[in-house]
Amino acid sequence: MVGIKRSRPELITVGYMGDGGGYSIGSQHLLNAAVRNEKVTLILVNNTNYGMTGGQMAPTTLPGQKTETTPFGRDPELTGYPTKGPEFVAQLTPDTAYVARATVSKYNQLKRFIRNALRNQIEGNGFSFVEVLSTCPTNWRTNAQQTWRFLEDEMEQHFPIGELKTPFGKGDK
Ligand SMILES: Cc1ncc(C[n+]2csc(CCOP(=O)(O)OP(=O)(O)O)c2C)c(N)n1
């Protein structure tokens, strides 16, 4: 995607990835694209597990959370604490980057953050990154109520929602 954007800067490029893909399997790509302030937009969906391969522990799995590979709950002493992606990306990027965390449970805010991320690329400012807290009832094995509670209560405690870095100013929504 970075190669395409560099050779054809008039194109709008959007990457879509999971937390496993962005923070472990593909983390070197994320890190270096952020460091170089590449003019691309990345949307990273955080559902706290490797969903497609059946629900294994991901970098974002919460302490104590049960997954296929942590059947007794994630033990941070053995496997570390959840990766905070936007906080990490914000450290790597200059002030022309856009970095935010949103959630599918706050839809209007999510739309605004994605619009800002695209605007940042279109204006040629720099790297744009939005992590989106999301659900995974299949692998979480939760009903609708439990799913929403886990997203809004548990996940938001570890992963605070908001814009971490914006060239537009917080008031410019
Ligand atoms: C380099 C590499 N290693 C392993 C895989 C196998 N694989 C495919 S999807 C996946 C899990 C992805 O989880 P995540 O990125 O969190 O996305 P989700 O499925 O939860 O949306 C893995 C390990 C792969 N595609 N590429």
Image (cartoon, rainbow, N blue to C red):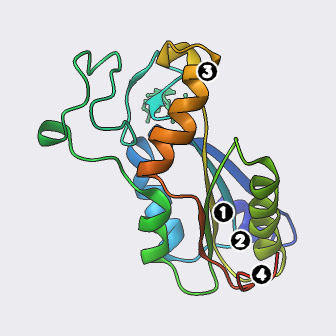
Q: Pointer 3 and pointer 1: residues touching (CB < 8 Å)?
A: no
Residue 139: x and y in percent read: 49, 16
Callout 4: helix, strand or loop? loop
- The picture quadrant where one finds residue 20 is top left
- For image coordinates 28% across by 37% down, the residue present is 63
Foreground mark, 3 or 1, reads: 3
Foreground mark, 2 or 3, reads: 3
Disc 2 designates what residue?
6
**Mark 1 Cα-neighbour bin, 10 Å: few <14, some 14–19, many ≥20:** few
Measure how far apart labels 1 and 4 are at the Cα level.
16 Å
Of label 2 and label 4, which has the lower sequence position? 2
- The picture quadrant where one finds residue 101 is bottom right
- For image coordinates 51% across by 31% down, the residue present is 150
Residue 74: x and y in percent read: 25, 30
Of label 1 and label 4, which has the lower sequence position? 1
Disc 3 designates what residue?
145
Foreground mark, 4 or 3, reads: 3
Measure how far apart labels 3 and 1 are at the Cα level.
43 Å
**Mark 2 Cα-neighbour bin, 10 Å: few <14, some 14–19, many ≥20:** few
- The kind of residue tagged 1 is Gly
